[in-house]
Image: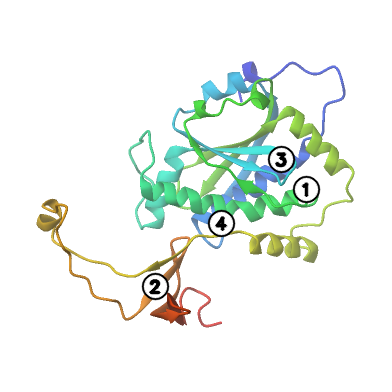
Amino acid sequence: MTGSLLLRPRTVVPDDFSWMHDFGKLLGDAMCDFIVNPRAGEVSVQAVNEVRYAEWSPSQPEFTILMPFNLGNSGIEIVIAVPGHFISQILNVQYGGSSDLSKRSSLSKSEMRLLDRLTAHLLPYIDSVMNRIIPEPATAKSAKVGIQELNLPQYRDSIVLAEVSLQCVNISPTTVNCFVGYGHATKISSLFANLAPAPTSSGPEWQARMHAAALRVKLPMRAVLTQVNIPMSQLASLRPGDILPVLPPKNVRLLIAGRPLAGGSLGESSGRVALKIENMEGPDSEL
């Protein structure tokens, strides 16, 4: 963080934004969990500062993904700013490639779907911290591509910003930023100050909160009914009206957030096409 972006010291006792440091660390851990499971990597919060948003945003790469989250019904919004190139690297690594990619200025459809999965993955982590002061679950707003896309009134003065350094396996070292408007940050600080000491991340209370938050997350479910492989020559000549023969599958795969969950067979229930689960897939299928 360059000195020119920092605000002059306030004349009152500075607010305690230690919660932002802890939140940033948990956010980094969550992202490493998403990239490789179990977690493998190093996460550190480089700084938590009050900065002018109007001066900080132009210093960031134009190809930045802004992920806003509403904290229940409090009216408080927390924004996570992720380099767009970071999303591209994650997708390539998860498909068996490397993080050595040429930089682009937009996300593909596959990368946008991965961004949706990452958003759903982060929600229970956010709730595990914020549910102590805001009982309603956090919700995700539509992500914005481009650092200049976020120009809301609450960010015209100053923000409290956490810089989180990530060194995850197979991914280039990356800095992810998390920020909240200064007024909202002080409100959160006040709410935390009125609480009893937080349970540790290894305690049963924290684990119970994390489990409850995870169960509230909604994930997209998709059944793959058919898949057709055709030569490139035929693909290049496809026109409206062409017919591709398909065969009904014996086993329909059920995907959750893009990952296999179960297999089943097609049938009918109450007059509607339905899927009967025949077997479970994934690492916990034999449990």
What numbered label is drawn on residue 253? 2
The answer to which of marks 1 and 2 sits earlier in the sequence is: 1
How far apart, in angstroms, are the residues tagged by discs 3 and 2? 42 Å
> SS class of the residue under badge 1?
loop
**What's under tag 2, amino acid-wise?**
Arg
Q: Residues within 10 Å of mark 3 (few under 14, many from 20)?
A: many
Q: Residues within 10 Å of mark 4 (few under 14, many from 20)?
A: some
**What's under tag 1, amino acid-wise?**
Ile
273 with respect to 211 (left or right): left
The answer to which of marks 3 and 2 sits earlier in the sequence is: 3
Which residue bears the numbered disc 1? 134
Q: Residues within 10 Å of mark 2 (few under 14, many from 20)?
A: many
Which residue bears the numbered disc 3? 21
**What's under tag 4, amino acid-wise?**
Asp
Residue drawn 88% across and 48% down?
A: 195
How far apart, in angstroms, are the residues tagged by discs 1 and 4? 25 Å
Viewer-nearest of discs 1 and 4: 1
Q: Is residue 195 visible?
A: yes
Viewer-nearest of discs 3 and 2: 2
**What's under tag 3, amino acid-wise?**
His
Q: Position of residue 179 (x, y in %)?
A: 65, 34
The answer to which of marks 3 and 1 sits earlier in the sequence is: 3
Q: Position of residue 108 (x, y in %)?
A: 36, 44
What numbered label is drawn on residue 282? none
